[in-house]
Amino acid sequence: RALARRLVEVVEPDRPAVLVMVRSEPIPASFEQERMWLANGPHAGAPVYNSGVTAILRGNVDTQALVTATQAILDRFEVLRTRLFWSDGQLVQTIDPPGSVAVRFEDWSHRDDDEDALEAAALQRLHEATAAAYDLARDAPSRALVMKLSNETHMWLFAAHHVAADAWSLGHVIPEVLFKAYDAALARQVADLGPIPLHYADYAAWQRSPAMATVYDDELSYWRDQLFGAE
């Protein structure tokens, strides 16, 4: 993070700063969100841009602590609760409040299936949950599922549409928060995860700001001059 900040200072010293935006105002979608929205259109209903990370947890797992920790992920990151829709000819985002996206919990511990059959059915359930379509205007672009198969076996899923998270985020950022929040939940405490100074919506608003539009115009003019007469 320090290196990223230093690179910005050296390479882009004249660019406007990213600021926290007022959430009561419509926030435009970023270029990346709009690109993903358009790319998703022809595949609506198909899991082309769905991603998910799953885990089979064996041993002594506190079910309620696992659910609480997973909920902490959904509540921490605004982008996981952000819906996209068109308004006045522009794609904008609305951020639903913490708690609006809830972890789904399913208790399969009372089923009569043998262990292998139960796990196979649970894995199929995780696959279906990962592949389920997202309506980006109506649905949050993420979902989480905790399944209890027995006192010794749990299955866990955290899934998202690519408009909100990629495979790297799901595989690195999400588990880091999960482990910290789980340890806190075991102690019946709220995890001290620290504040997030800027969320993705702040970046999107900065990217679409009039100040950045001027930067884009200057850069475009530069390259027009450089490429003038090129064949």
Image (spheres, rainbow, N blue to C red):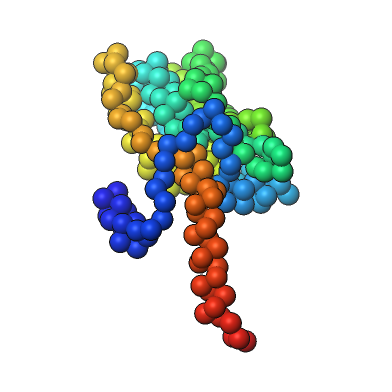
Q: Residue at 62% of width from left, 52% of height from top?
A: 35
Left or right, 35 with reference to 144: right
Query: Is residue 112 toward the left or the right of residue 1 in the image?
Result: right
- Where 163 sits versus 21, above or below? below
Q: What count of labels does the image hold?
A: 0
Q: Is residue 224 above or below residue 28?
A: below
* Residue 118 drawn at (x, y percent): 53, 25
- Lateral position of residue 69 relative to residue 93, left or right: left
The residue located at (26%, 50%) in the rendering is 2
Looking at this view, is 17 or 35 the one in front?
Answer: 17
Residue 173 at what x, y percent from top left? 38, 40
Q: Residue visible at 35% across and 21% down?
A: 61
Answer yes or no: is residue 151 visible: no
Q: Nearer the viewer, residue 186 or 26?
A: 26
Q: Residue at x 52, y 48 (%)?
A: 209
* Quadrant in which residue 90 is drawn: top right
Which image quarter is the C terminus in?
bottom right
Residue 43 spot, x, y in % from top left = 70, 47
Using residue 26 as the reference point, say whether residue 201 is left or right of it.
left
x and y percent of residue 174 in the render?
40, 36
Residue 13 visible at all: yes
- State the residue in front, 74 or 98: 98
